[in-house]
Each structure stands twice: as C-alpha cells, then as structure tokens.
Amino acid sequence: MNGGPSGFTNAPVTRAFIIASALFSIFFGIQGRFNTLGLSYQDIFGKLRIWKLIMSIFSFTSTPELMFGLYLLYYFRVFERQIGSNKYSVFIVFSVLASLLFEVFAVAFLKDPSATPVTPGPYGLIFASFVPFFFDIPVSTRFRLFGFHFSDKSFIYLAGLQLLLSSWKRSILPGVCGILAGSLYRLNVFYIRKAKFPEFISSFFSRISLPSMGSPTRTTPTRNVLGNVPSYPARQMERNFPAPMHSAVEPSEDSIATLVSMGFDRNSARQALVQARNDVNVATNILLEAQAH
C-alpha cells in the first residue's frame, strides 16, 4: 500500500503543514526550548500562555518524534487527495482545535500544577487521521512474519504506536484526544464534513509552499466523505460514459496510482483513464458517476 504518486502531487495543504512543522521543530530545537513548549495546568489556567497553545500544534520535542510524525503526516496526504485540499483544510482545523480542546479539558480535570506538561506536536491531526485510515483504507496485501499475520497497513500502525508511546504519558494524552477528534469528524458532528473554506484560503497553501516534484498538480474533485470507493464493472462505466471514437491512450502509472490512492480499484481506474484519455479529473468523475448508479 502506498499514498499514491510520490511527492506532494495533489497535496499542497499537507506540504505546507509539514514544512511548517519541520521549521518550527528545528527552530525550537536550535534554541533549546523544547521543554518550554509542553502544555501544563499552570500554563493554561495560571499564566494564560496562549502562545503555547499555538506553538504546541506544530513543534515536536525530539528527533525521533519529528521523524515518525512527519512520516505519518506525509503518508496521510492520501486523504487530501480523496476529498480535495479545501475540505482537507477543514479536517485539519477541526482536528487540531477539537483535540486541543480535549487536552485543555483533561488538564483542567487533573488539576495538578506540578504535573508533567502535555507533549507538543501535531498529535491531534496525526491521530485523528488514524480514524479514517482504520475504517476507509483497504488492505491490499497480507503476509506472515515469525508466525504473526501482518498487512501493508501494519507498518503505519506501528509508526503510530511508536509516536504514541514516544513520551509515555505526555504523548498518550494528545494521541487519545486526536482519536476522539477524528471520531467526531467521522460522525459528522455539526455537519463538519460538509463545511468548506472560501476558495482563496485553500489555494493560499499552494502559493506559499514549495513546488512539488513529479507530475503537475491537478485539483482533485471534492467528495463529502473520507473513504475508499469500491470497484465498478467496466460495463457500468461504459454505460454512463461511452468510449470515445478515437484510439485509446494507455494511461500513465502516475495517473493510475493517483486514482488508486483515492480508493478506486486499479482495473476500474485504468479503464476510466483510457476513456478519459489520461485526464485524472475526468476519470475521477467517471468513477464517481458509476458509483452513483
């Protein structure tokens, strides 16, 4: 299983978030101020250090956490390709704010000024992403290792477990809060899955982030849910979108991988691309139209 084509193709919001997280982590690491970023009862309810709430969203506190965290953020770019950059921006904001609110409630409930602060980092977004990853990303391969059953998803879970336990109690709390935030998003609380930002906000990330490597970025049509799409028979797609009269164009592997990363079956993706002459947007519409019938 992979996250689709390499690089940040069709994932400008993920690219911007990863760059911001890496820069903030490196900056505070050079300054030696990692220990000042963790949230505590005194910071929130005593000294009202609101800046900590903001900085704790991006900055990791150690190199291992940074490596595992950025790897997971990079992999979960698949969700931005599924629902589009606009709705993925909503997912990020909702996950971060909801998980941060849960953290504040947890710290208030403990009421221990001397307690170890909650570790900073985008734990809310990362572990919120594990909810659609568990329910919506299908297993493509299974294998046995030392008598144990594994799948291609197992490596992502192991990376998440390593990050969850990286700082023990300090990291478990924000991880659990992130899972709760992801569950609320999946339950469509306040109809959040239908929310969208004004287009200029989501396109802002494309302008400020570095150019991606690989094929040119195409805007992926927006869907209302995070989830995989089952395969559809070729006859169904042909009925809705008859094949053109011109000769078939063999689709590129990057285009097929893009549709597969969105949850479509490989064979259906290839057939749709043949009909669409390797246009990913048109092929996606073909597959979604087949879903509607």
Image (cartoon, rainbow, N blue to C red):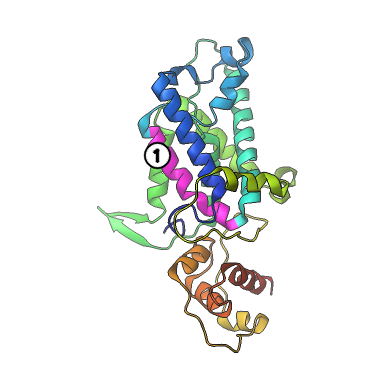
Q: Name the residue: 36% across, 33% down.
A: 64
**Residue type highlighted by circle 1:** Phe
Q: Position of residue 122 (x, y in %)?
A: 52, 34
Q: Name the residue: 49% across, 27% down.
A: 120
Looking at the rendered structure, the number of numbered marks drawn on it comes to 1
Q: Secondary structure at mark 1?
A: helix
Please tell me whether residue 113 belongs to the stretch shown in magenta.
Answer: no
- Of 168 and 75, nearer the camera is 75
**Camera sees residue 161:** no
Q: Which residue is mark 1?
A: 68
Q: Name the residue: 57% across, 14% down.
A: 43
The residue most toward the left is 146
Up-down relation of residue 226 to residue 249 (above or below): above
Q: Position of residue 36 (x, y in %)?
A: 48, 17
Please tell me whether residue 68 belongs to the stretch shown in magenta.
Answer: yes
Q: In the rendered image, which quarter contains the C terminus?
A: bottom right
Q: Position of residue 231 (x, y in %)?
A: 55, 71
Up-down relation of residue 73 to residue 54 (above or below): below
Q: Position of residue 233 (x, y in %)?
A: 56, 79
- Of 228 and 3, nearer the camera is 3
Up-down relation of residue 215 to residue 92 (above or below): below
**Camera sees residue 264:** yes
Q: Would residue 40 appear left or right of 236 to someone viewing this image?
A: left
Q: Main secondary structure of the magenta part?
A: helix
Q: In the rendered image, which quarter contains the N terminus?
A: bottom left
Task: Identify the image quadrant of residue 90.
Answer: top right
Q: Name the residue: 42% across, 44% down.
A: 71
Label 1: few (<14), some (14–19) or many (≥20) C-alpha neighbours in 10 Å: some
Q: Point out the stretch of residues depicted in magenta.
A: 65-82
